[in-house]
Image (tube, grey):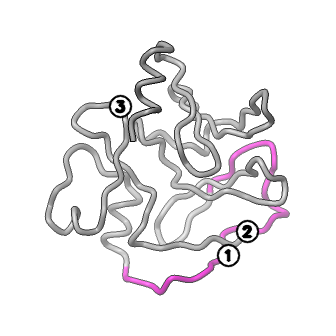
Amino acid sequence: VLAMLEPCSSLSTIVNGGSPFPTKLTGGELAAGKTPGLLSQNQKALDEAPSFPRTWVPLASSLELDPNRPTPVSFLGQKYVVYQGSNEDEWVVVDDACPHRLAPLSEGRIDTTESGSRLLQCAYHGWSFDDSGMCQDIPQMTKELKQRAFENP
């Protein structure tokens, strides 16, 4: 599995002002010291790591990956999780940290929806994420709250 890693556009997230909805941090916000909430370990590792060019890097062999479960991998001190997405020919690589409570997503499971989409589900509170990293389900929320949350950009 090859992954395009870009330190400037990490998927690392913070918990925004106590809200359960994650917000992406930009390099400029980090440089300006605007870091409310908790930073993920990956974002800290990115800030401390030497810069490297935008490039494809091998993270794992497809022989060591199980298509039915998430697999933890690491690269330059950062932890990632690899899992087979909705397209059987593609593997998905994301930070190994749920944006809700930073629990390792590699300890979660793959859930297949009625439409055939495969979601990565966090083992801690059950939040589910699609292949693009977008949260698709929060089991503890009512239907009204889910609708408002997922309509909010």
Residue depicted at 37% across the width and 66% down the height: 45
Q: Are marks 2 and 1 in contact (CB under 8 Å)?
A: yes
The stretch drawn in magenta includes residue 55: yes
Question: What residue is pinned by disc 1?
Answer: 58
For badge 2, the amino acid type reads Val
Taking 110 as reference, is 152 left or right? left
Residue, disc 3: 20
Q: Nearer the viewer, residue 21 or 72?
A: 21
Find the distance from the CA under tag 3 to the CA under tag 1: 33 Å
Label 3 vs label 1, nearer the camera: 3
Is 103 left, or right, of 115 in this rendering? left
Q: Residues within 10 Å of mark 2 (few under 14, many from 20)?
A: some
Q: Position of residue 114 (x, y in %)?
A: 78, 27
- Crowding near pointer 3: few (<14 within 10 Å), some, many (20+)? some
Element marked by disc 1 = strand
Please tell me in which quadrant of the rendered image residue 102 appears.
top left
Q: SS at mark 3?
A: loop
> Compared to 41, does 62 lie above or below?
below
Quarter of the image with the N terminus in it? bottom right
Q: CA distance from mark 2 to mark 3?
A: 31 Å
**SS at mark 2?**
loop
Badge 1 crowding class, 10 Å Cα cut-off, few under 14, some 14 to 19, many 20 or more, is few
Give the residues drawn in magenta, as a range.
50-72
Residue 88, placed above or below residue 124: below
Q: Check disc 2 and report the residue beneath it.
A: 1
| Kind of residue sitting beneath label 1 | Pro
Decide which of tag 2 and tag 3 comes sooner along the chain.
Answer: 2
Taking the spot 38% from the left edge, 72% from the top edge, the residue there is: 8
